[in-house]
Image (cartoon, rainbow, N blue to C red):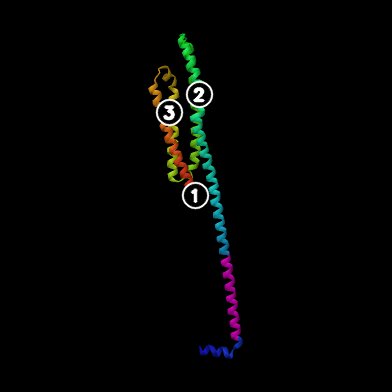
């Protein structure tokens, strides 16, 4: 300590120069440290902003996709539970009335003509239903790409139930003439019970899927 004091006493200019240099270096350190701190803070703010923007975009995209899918699912259910039966009723009535009229006079050619016409109408409805099912499956496949494992499982179950309902309804329509002509009320009731059960399962699964969708959106 005494040696340092002697150096300062006999060389005050040297000490002042050293002190000045130290101050300069300290000032530079503080400056660059502040610059580094400001850059880090700006980078953090930028990253947080990007993350917030990304989350917002992901939320909006998924919310839009989920909303569209649920709307299409609702439209599918309404169409095949309400609209299509209403469109088919006049066809059933015409088929039965004309077939019974032809049967009463023994007009076999007319009977065959009516059955052929009815089959073509049923085939048209079946084809329309198949297109609707495939469209719904295509939309669910897109959503599966970014869905959770639980959602994929629910999507798959919903697809199977939708197709099973469609197949059962087509089977029922295909046997409708036979059921009416033979007055097979037991078979008719069995089809209706099976369709009702599939409809209830489909509705429950759809509600589960919507709950999973809401949960995923809340986590974004």
Residue 163 shown left or right of residue 58 in the figure = left
Q: Nearer the viewer, residue 95 or 21?
A: 95
Residue in view at x 59 percent, y 82 percent: 19
Residue in view at x 42 percent, y 28 percent: 168
Q: Nearer the viewer, residue 115 or 211?
A: 211
> Callout 1 environment at 10 Å: few (<14), some (14 to 19), or many (20+)?
few
Real-space CA distance between mark 1 and mark 2, rounded to the nearest whole angstrom:
43 Å
List x then y, in percent, for residue 150.
Answer: 43, 44
Real-space CA distance between mark 3 and mark 2, rounded to the nearest whole angstrom:
16 Å
Asked if the stretch drawn in magenta spans residue 32, the answer is yes
- Prevailing secondary structure class for the magenta stretch in the rendered image: helix
Asked if the stretch drawn in magenta spans residue 212, the answer is no
**Farthest residue toward the top?**
105
Name the residue that disc number 3 marks: 168
Residue in view at x 56 percent, y 53 percent: 53
- The answer to whether residue 160 is seen in the rendering is no
> Callout 3 environment at 10 Å: few (<14), some (14 to 19), or many (20+)?
some
Q: Nearer the viewer, residue 106 or 18?
A: 106
Element under disc 2: helix
Element under disc 1: helix
Start and end of the magenta stretch?
14-38
Name the residue that disc number 1 marks: 218
List x then y, in percent, for residue 179.
Answer: 41, 20
Residue 23 shown left or right of residue 182 in the figure = right
Residue 47: quarter of image: bottom right
List x then y, in percent, for residue 57.
Answer: 56, 49
């Amino acid at each position: 300590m005494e040696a340092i004091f002697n150096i300062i006493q006999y060389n005050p200019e040297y000490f002042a120069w050293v002190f000045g240099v130290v101050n300069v270096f300290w000032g530079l350190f503080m400056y660059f440290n502040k610059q580094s701190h400001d850059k880090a803070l700006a980078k953090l703010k930028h990253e947080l902003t990007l993350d917030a923007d990304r989350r917002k975009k992901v939320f909006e995209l998924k919310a839009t996709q989920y909303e569209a899918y649920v709307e299409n699912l609702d439209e599918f259910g309404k169409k095949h539970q309400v609209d299509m039966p209403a469109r088919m009723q006049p066809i059933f009535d015409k088929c039965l009335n004309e077939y019974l009229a032809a049967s009463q006079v023994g007009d076999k050619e007319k009977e065959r003509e009516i059955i052929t016409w009815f089959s073509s109408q049923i085939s048209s409805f079946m084809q329309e239903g198949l297109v609707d099912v495939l469209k719904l499956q295509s939309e669910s496949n897109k959503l599966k790409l970014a869905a959770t494992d639980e959602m994929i499982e629910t999507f798959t179950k919903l697809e199977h139930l939708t197709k099973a309902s469609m197949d059962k309804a087509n089977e029922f329509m295909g046997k409708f003439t036979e059921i009416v002509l033979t007055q097979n009320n037991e078979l008719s009731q069995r089809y209706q019970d099976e369709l009702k059960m599939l409809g209830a399962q489909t509705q429950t699964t759809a509600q589960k899927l919507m709950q999973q969708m809401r949960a995923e959106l809340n986590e974004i």
